[in-house]
Every structure is written in C-alpha cells, then in structure tokens.
Image (cartoon, grey):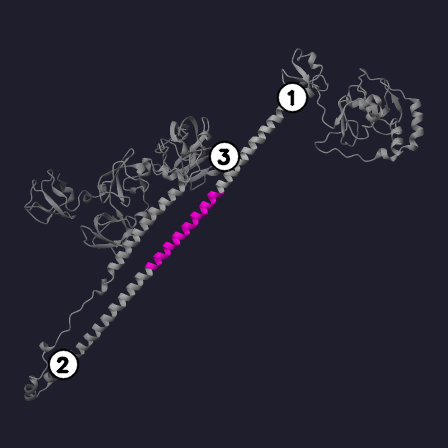
Amino acid sequence: MAESKLRDLDQYSCSICLDLMKNPVTIPCGHSYCMSCISSYWDMDKRNNCPQCRQNFGSRPVLNKNTMLADIMEKLKDTKPQAASLAQPEAEAGDVECDFCTGRKVRAVKSCLECRASYCEIHLQPHYDFPVLMRHKLVNATFMPVCQKHDKLLEVFCQTDQKCICVLCLMDEHKGHDTVSCAKERDEKQVKLEVDKSKFEEKCKEKEKELYTLQKAIESHVQSAHRAVEDTEKAFSESVTFIKKRRSEIIERIRAQEKADLDRLGDLRKQLELEIATLRGQGNVLDKLLQTEDNIHFLQNFENMPNPAGVQDSPSQSLELDASFGNVSKRVSDFKERLEEVSKQEADKILESVSDLLIKSSPDQIKIGDRVRVKSSVKTPRFNWGSHVTHKSVGEVKAVHGETLIVSFPGHENWKGDLSEMELVTGGIKPEASTQKRSIKVGDRVRVKPSVDTPKHKWGRVSHQSVGVVKALDGEAMTVDFTEHPGWKGIVSEMEVVSADDVSGVLTGNNSFHIGDKVRVKSTVVTPKHQWGGVTHKSVGVVTDIKEDTVIVDFPECKGWKGIISEMELLSSKDTEECFRVGDRVRVKASVSTPKNGWGSASHKSVGVVTAVKGKIIAVDFPEHKSWNGIVSEMELVPSADSEYCKFKPGDRVRVKASVRTPKYNWGSVSHESVGTIKALKVVVDFPEQSDWAGNPSEMELCS
C-alpha cells in the first residue's frame, strides 16, 4: 500500500527536484515542474527543451503558475511519504550519473535510448508509470553515444567508412553508403570475434604445451647443473684427498728415511767417538812418555808405545747432509708446477665447455631488421671482429643466409657473423649525454665511441682503439689519461665505458703494446699464424718492434719471433715475476734503488745473463760481476734494442766487423777474416788462432 501511495504522490512530484511541486507551472508540451526548477534547468541547458520528452520550444516559453496544481500540492504536503527521500547511492569515479539529480550526484541504474538520458531509481519511476514512457527502451546505465554533429543517438553503422553514425548522417556525408543497424553489425562482428577467440584459445593451448616442455627442459637443465656441481665437488674432493694421501705417504717415507739415516749416522758417530777416545788415550800415553826426563825409562818403554800404523780405520762412510733430500724437494717443486699447469689447462677446458652450453635459437628467431649483438660468451667471432665491432656493438640484420648473418654495425657495414654467435637486442638504447654522465665516473676505463668520426676537441694522438682512465669530470667536459696522450680533453657524450669483458677485445690495437712490454701467446691460440718456432704457451718474451697488426718479440727460445697482435697478451709484473729462464738477458729495475743483496760491481746499466733461478733467488752473470745473486722481483727482461748482448748467445759463430779498425781489446792473433764461436757473453770468443779472446759486442757480427 505504501508503494502504491508513493506512486500516486510521484505524479505530483517535480521530476527535477523529486519533491512535490512548488509554484507548479505547465510548459507547452504538457509536463509540469516547479517554476524555479525548470527555470534553473533552462538556464543551464540553454536549449529550452522539456527534461522528460525533450521537445524543443525554440524560444523560452513564458511560465505561468498552474493554480489547480498549486491547490493540490497544498493538500498533499502533509501526506508526503518519507520513502521518497530515501538515500540514493552516490556516483563514484567511472559511474554513470543521473541526468535529473541536482546537487548531490546520484548513480544512475538505467539509461533510456529514446530519451537519451540516464536515471536513478526515483527518476526512473515515470518510465514505469506513464504508458507513453513504458514503450521506451531501457538498458543498464551507460554513457549515451551521441553524434557530435547532429546531437542524435548513434544507431546506424556505416560499412563503407566503418564507423557508427546517426540517422541524420545518412542524409548527409554518408548518403549512398552501405549501412546497417548497429545491432546487426554487432551480431556479424561478434561471430568473427568468437572465431578469433577460439583461435586465441588454441594458440594459448599451444603456448601452454611449449611452456610445459620448456619447464621440463629447465628442470632437466637445473638437475644437470646440480649433478655437474655435485660431480665437480666430488671429483675435486677426491683429488684433494688423493693428493693429501700421497703427500702423507711421501712425508712418511721421508721421515722414515730420515730416521734410518740418522740411526745409521748415530752408530757411525758413536764408532767415531770411540775411535777418537782410543786415539786420544794412546796419544796421552805417548805424551806422558815424551814428558819424562828419565832417559832410561824413555828408551825401555819406547818399543811398547802404540803405533799409529797399527790402528785399524773403520770403513769410510759419508753422507752429503746439506743436499741429501735436495733432489726430493726439486721433484716436489716440479710436480707442483706440472700439477698447476695441467690443472689450469684442464680447468680452462671445463670452463670453455660450460660456456659452450648455449641455448640454441632457431634460425627464424633472428630475421631481417632485427637488432642484434655478439653474445658475451663468444671470445672471438667465427669471421673475426672487424673494425669497431665489440660485445657492446648493436647492429641491424640486413640479410640471413642459412647460418650466416649480414649485419650493419655503426662504423662497420655488411659485417658477417655466425647465427649461433648472435643474440637479439630488445628494448631501446639511450646513449644520451645525461645517461653517460651518470654512468661514467672518475677512474673508469673509457674510449671514444665508434659512432664519433671526429671528437669535438680533435683526436690528438688518440684513436678509436685507445683506452684511457678518466681523471676528472666537469659537467660535460672530461679529462682522460691515455697512454698515447695524457691529459686528453673530451666530451662525455662522445665517450663510452670499457668493461672488463671488453678489455680483451680492446687489446688488439697497436696502442695496447709497446716496445719493451712483456708478452706471451694467448692460451686460446692453438697454433699462431706464423707457427710456434721454439716458442710455447709458457714462453715470455719482450716486444722489440710493432708494425700494424704484426709484433716482433724476443723470446729466450726464439729471437725476432713474428706474431699477430690479436694472438698475444700483455703480462703484468706479477705474471712475469717468476718467468725468468736460464739464458735470459736481464738487468736491475730502474725503480730499485739498492738491491736486497747489494750492487757488488753491477749497476742499473749492467746487462747480464741468467745462470740459475731458485724460487725467488736469481743468479746472473754480469760483465762486471760474475755469479751475482739477486731477487726475482727486482729484475726485468732486457729487449734486444737495449743491449748489444741480446744479439748473441753462446755457440754463435762471429767475427769482427769490417768497419772496426782496431778492437777495444786489441787483435791478438785474430783478424777480420777470423771466424770464432762465442764461449761466454763478456763477449769471450774461441778463434782457431786464439782461444778465450775477449771482445766488445758492438764490434762483433754474426756469421751466416
């Protein structure tokens, strides 16, 4: 009953304020409102239409009070039910608001496609009460799609232009186009979307299968890695246990041998002590007789005195105590070196095998136009690095021929690479100055970017291959110490940081090697381009000349050895500290003020030949001081350019240069035609005419 009564009262309520009408007025279409409500509505709307039926009146109608409705309102004031003022849910962000609520915004529950308005529960009531409104189509509250040009509801779909239009658009710019109702077009497109959805579901199932397979592969890979770790730990633990066991056996054997030797030496010592006591006793008897003054007593006892010739000597036994176990120590030291060498080589092979466990990509994953770079696990690409290409370089794929890619890198067009060595680069690269400024700091190793043709402050003695250390940063300006150019000025945006992984790639430029540097062949090089000669991976030599990509090195095993810069590596002082070999030419480092064992007759200018190396101790024959003893860390190798001695070695056949009129130490029996053999590096030469001839190295020449 309450609801029926409320509905009866609603027909006298203003549909704008939802309260009983005050000063009711009736507009030309027949609808009635509060005079103030309809006036305010028209002030805001500016179109002078009816809020309910939307009839437009052109000019604003004159409002006159409806006296009959006013009387009815007065009678109904006391019967207004409280239900009409029940709280309505307030509209939140994203909700459709009721078009008729003033003040507080209330959430709409339905939208009318005929009225093109949205209503809350109370304002929607007339659509249930009035027959003319009951025929309107109500839908769940939604934002009404209205034509921006004609202010009409979008009800038609233009298939020609593929857009929603209103009925007036059919008579305007869409006249003659293929059109259907939006509902019909929706039905057709919904069928297509359902087909597309089923395809997506099929693809999703395929991807789920791939994911399942990948997950299984990952689990297998993880298990394999765990097994490898366990096997590695077990193998190394067993190796350590085995070595410890063998160590104990050797130590026990040494201790046992030491005890046996000491027992034997103890017996020998006791025997010698007894013999000494006997001899001393007999000596005392002789001494006593010698001291007697009685001649008769002396002569009577002379024949009874002990005779030294009658004393039997025990078998002579000797043992070189100072070096009795020296051979064992040497063998242990040799064993340690061989074990370390073999362990390093085998460990490197194991590490390489781990690095080779790359997840293979199918060829169709890298295609023309993709951005790629060389994988960080690749030390040297199959077709080499080329110019300016490094692990950081990002290029665009220009062609794919089977397993071979053609890539355009900055500074190197049409670079050729192997598909398995490349990886896709996703995301953007932002080499802005601000980014570089944040990433470059004092102490970083940097170089000029390959994309920079000419630095702002010019090259100086620097090149793209030069690597220097940042000494100062001042805004965009930076100071870099290059080997070729200390204090070089540059711009942050022109530079890039060189990581530790890139250093090996940078060491292919001539600026990485200098005459006098200590180098060796990289362990990754199986056979050098110009062959080994007498050189091995362990050989350490001194750079004597550099010509483009070729380096000339003096190794102890091979003087004037020719190699390729990319095949060589620099050695630090720590690497070379124990790399001296017998026959090497050496001198005391300039940084050493006084050698630990003193100068003797040697000096910083003295160049000698290594005769022995025992741990940290090195024995050198200097021209000024034979058998000079020094410390390995105080010495340095001497390149041939620094010493005339480096031209010769014992056994070389030499003669006096034709340009020498009189040798420094005179001719003796020698002449310009004499050919002799170097005996020692003073230089001492054995000529047929004269042995042990002394000469000056600068006056001599090799004979073919």
Q: Nearer the viewer, residue 271 or 691?
A: 271
> Which numbered disc flags the more N-terminal residue, 2 or 1?
1
| Distance CA(mark 2)–CA(mark 1) | 138 Å
Q: Circle 1 is placed at which residue position?
A: 188
Give the residue type at disc 2. Gln
Residue occupied by mark 3: 434
Query: Looking at this view, is 419 or 19 the one in front?
Result: 419
Query: Dot 2 corresponds to which residue?
Result: 282
Mark 3 or mark 2, whichever is nearer to me? 2
As measured in the structure, the alpha-carbon distance from the residue carrying label 3 to the one carrying label 2 is: 102 Å
Q: Is residue 358 left or right of residue 14?
A: left
Q: Find numbered disc 2 in the image and state the secondary structure of the residue it sits on.
A: helix
Q: Quadrant of residue 697?
A: top left
Q: Is residue 604 magenta?
A: no
The image quarter containing residue 617 is bottom left
Q: Amino acid at mark 3?
A: Ser
Nearer to me, 454 or 675:
675
